[in-house]
Image: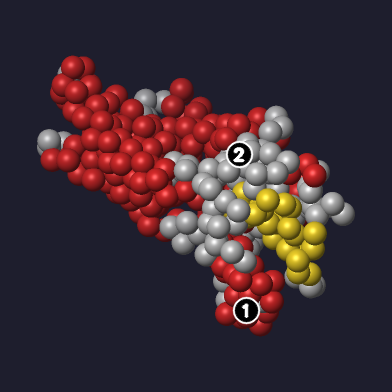
Amino acid sequence: MAYSEPLFVAIEMLMTVVVLRMKSLWKYSLLTLLATALFYVRYVGPIFTAIILLVSLCLDLRLRGLLRALILNSVVVIVSSFLTWLWILRNQSIDGSGLGFMQGGGGSYWKAFTMIPGTIGEWISGSPPKIELLSWTAHPTLPKVAMVCLLVVVMPLLTLTVIDRLKTDRKFSESQFRTLVMTSALIVGYVLFSVYRFVKVHRASLDDRVMIPIFVPMVILLCILVEQALVNRKTLRYLVASLALSLLVLQAGVTAKQSWVYGRDGRHLTSTAVHNWPLHVFARSLPGDGRFFSNEMQTLFANTDIWPIGNPWMGDEPPLVPCNNRYVVWYNESVVTDNKPDSLSKILFEDASGTVFDVGPCGSDIDLYWN
């Protein structure tokens, strides 16, 4: 999953190009293949398929009529959904869950939404991606400053674009309008879905990895709108060009610095050194029929191939596959610090990197070992 983003974005953008540019009936066969591939790369693919095909339906109305447009786009949904369903059944047979263990993060929708501006600020400033930053205030200063600067620069330009549309006869071209509709739908639709998913379905912070599918649509949308604001405004064009150049210098400096830091200290938690941590060596030696929990599920999986792994709040849920004993692998270096096993739990292993707890047999009351 962690390395699927470039491929996912490429397929997403290819789908939008097909919808916006192709007019032959081959378009729907290609959309079916791409929609299926989108899910196989990342499980949120069907959300983008739904958004893109909804726009496709609207754009097809004039060319094909309501009934024909509805039938053709529905066929894409039905066929790609069937192929998706087969893969979910396959997952169900392996670990008892269709899309893996998930649990909502709770809290308010607004607080979940405030993670997104900080993530956009990371993109603007070129800052290294962070995870588990669960609010705007949790982000470092540089991304927050970058996001504020973006609003200060872009909002007046967008206002000028709106004024130009109202006061003059200049209109967006058909191609620009169709592109604006598609990119706006992708951004708004995925943001709403991500906020809902975090609160109700899956506690996955809305960080760089999760929100990257809206990056390219956002860039395209802003470029079209800002370009319109700069028409017949020579001085403003020079100002915006200067700001863009300054941004490139900032990002180049941050990138050079972070590259040096990563090269010196390492970055990825799947390096050979991390893979051979005594904590991971011990975890790999535990029985394969155990049920595992961790406050860093991806790190544990990447270094042990243990699966499935629950988060620290899933102890009371019934196991999805038969198990013999329960274990918690707790990492000391983590932003997730709540619900660590207490003195009721037996310590099997402990060092500076973390602790492995025995939280009792699978058939027993977990509250006797972990509360």
Mark yes or no: residue 119 visible: no
- The colour mode here is secondary structure
Asked if one can make out residue 189 in the rendered structure from this viewpoint, the answer is: yes
Q: Which disc number belongs to residue 276?
A: 1
Left or right placement of residue 330 versus residue 252 in this view: right
Mark 1 or 2, which is nearer the eye?
2
Instruction: Please report the residue visible at 63 percent of the width from the left and 38 percent of the height from the top.
Output: 317
Residue 327 to residue 304: above or below? above
Q: Tell me how far mark 1 sits from mark 2, CA to CA.
A: 32 Å
Query: Picture coordinates of residue 137 (x, y %)?
Result: 77, 45
Picture layout, residue 88 above or below residue 286: above
269, above or below 144, in the image: below
- Choose between 323 and 300: the one closer to the eye: 323
Badge number at residue 208: none
For the residues bearing labels 1 and 2, Cβ distance under 8 angstroms: no
Residue type at mark 1 is: Asn
**Helix, strand or loop at mark 2:** loop
Q: Earlier in the sequence, mark 1 or mark 2?
A: 1
Indicate the quadrant where residue 206 lies: top right
Q: Residue at x 68, y 57 (%)?
A: 327
Of 146 and 3, nearer the camera is 3
Classify 10 Å Cα crowding around label 1: few (below 14), some (14-19), many (20 and above): some
Closer to us: 209 or 358: 358
Badge 2: residue crowd in 10 Å (few <14, some 14–19, many ≥20): few
Q: Is residue 210 left or right of residue 94?
A: right
Badge 2 is on which residue?
Answer: 318
Labels in figure, total: 2
Image coords of residue 337 (percent x, y): 78, 52
Task: State the quadrant of the C terminus.
Answer: top right
Residue 64 lies, in percent from the top left, at 15, 23
Q: Quadrant of residue 127?
A: bottom right
Disc 1 is placed on an element classified as loop
